[in-house]
Amino acid sequence: MLGKTAGGLFWMFRYLERAENTARLLEAGWRIALTRTGEAENEWQSVITTAGLAQQFNAAHDEYDAPEVIDFLLRGKTNPTSVLASLAAARSNARLVRTALSSEVWEATNECWMEAKALLARPVSERTLYDTLARIKFRSAVVRGALHGTMLRNDIFSFARLGTFIERGDNTARILDVKYYVLLPATALVGTRIDNAQWENILRSVSAEQSYHWLNGGQTSPMGIAEFLILDRRMPRSLAFCCQKIGENLGQLAQEYGTRHPSHDLADRMCARMNENTIQSIFEAGLHEFLTDSILDMGQIASLIETDYRFYR
């Protein structure tokens, strides 16, 4: 496969995942802001910080008001990673690699972009935010379903999935890192309905609330949530699951092309790090440090994959 085609597939699915993750993060922030009487601005600020966009947002805005944050993340012209910009980039990459995609995947991607463009043609109010985000997440899921249902399990599929899981792992680490410290409850709030609602919204931001309660009988704790989102391989947005899938897809490429690269070695180290740690050892060494290293690993392996498979040639 040409490196340019591999890069197009990789970035197409990174951008699709990024748009969906932004929608999920925005929904979680909106829900938590509803539970924080008089402190909603702090939550909107944490949403921007989690997305890694504080510098861009502060350059254009003075306050973290809900309408400004919502518009910035969904369709802000100064935000190159807004939902609208991410979906436009996904569609652009899909056009570049259209001959490598099934007609169903291309059509689902094009329809995702067209509906998002119509939904975001004007500012979205808090009253209509939930429905708008639900449509964006649904359209993203349709593209993913078309990929799984119609594409050969070959190098095309592997590059698409690598883009998805690198972006997803990065997002889960960022959400847990920022939210953990933002939501550490004051003593007066421990065990209250407000405290529980805020922690549950961390799970909602990665679509894990129901699964977590199935496994834990409704008991919510910071360490339990961290363990679920970092180490539980049954959870498709956990760091361990993402690392496992990155390793598997790189392994399939190594088998198909008959060669290993530095990205394969880093993937092995990332998987070993997840296998060797418990949540207790992670907390003892420092949760923030562990998550920071995970974010750096995701960035490094993305760069190595681009180099190893010559995306720009």
Image (cartoon, grey):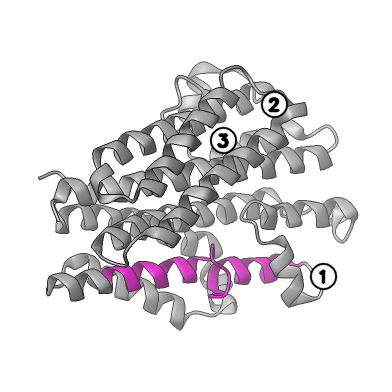
User: Which region is colored magenta?
Assistant: 221-250
Q: Give the quarter of the image for residue 122.
A: top right
Q: What amino acid type should be assigned to the residue bearing mark 1?
A: Gly
Distance of label 3 from label 2 (alpha carbons): 11 Å
- Give the secondary structure at mark 1: loop
Q: Main secondary structure of the magenta part?
A: helix
188 vs 44: above or below: below
- At 62% from the left and 66% from the top, the residue drawn is 226
Are dots 1 and 2 in contact, CB under 8 Å?
no
Residue found at x 49% / y 37%: 112
Please report whichever mark, 3 or 2, sits nearer to the chain's N-terminal start. 3
Crowd band around label 1 with a 10 angstrom C-alpha radius: few (<14), some (14–19), many (20+): few
Asked whether residue 32 appears in the rendered view, the answer is yes
- What residue is shown with label 3? 48
Relative to 217, residue 238 above or below? above
Identify the residue shown where x is 68% and y is 54%.
202
Q: Which residue is mark 1?
A: 218
- At label 2, the amino acid type is Ala
**Which is more toward the observer, 146 or 127?**
146
Question: Looking at the picture, which amino acid does disc 3 mark?
Answer: Ile
Residue 74 x %, y %: 56, 29
Q: Please tell me which residue is depicted at 68% across the width and 58% down the height of the picture.
A: 203
Which of the two labelled residues, at mark 3 and mark 1, occupies the earlier sequence position? 3
Q: Position of residue 293 (x, y in %)?
A: 41, 61
Decide which of tag 1 and tag 2 comes sooner along the chain: 2
Taking the image as drawn, is residue 186 in sight?
Answer: no
Q: Where is mark 2, residue-wise?
A: 66
All told, the count of numbered labels is 3
Q: Is residue 53 above or below residue 108?
A: above
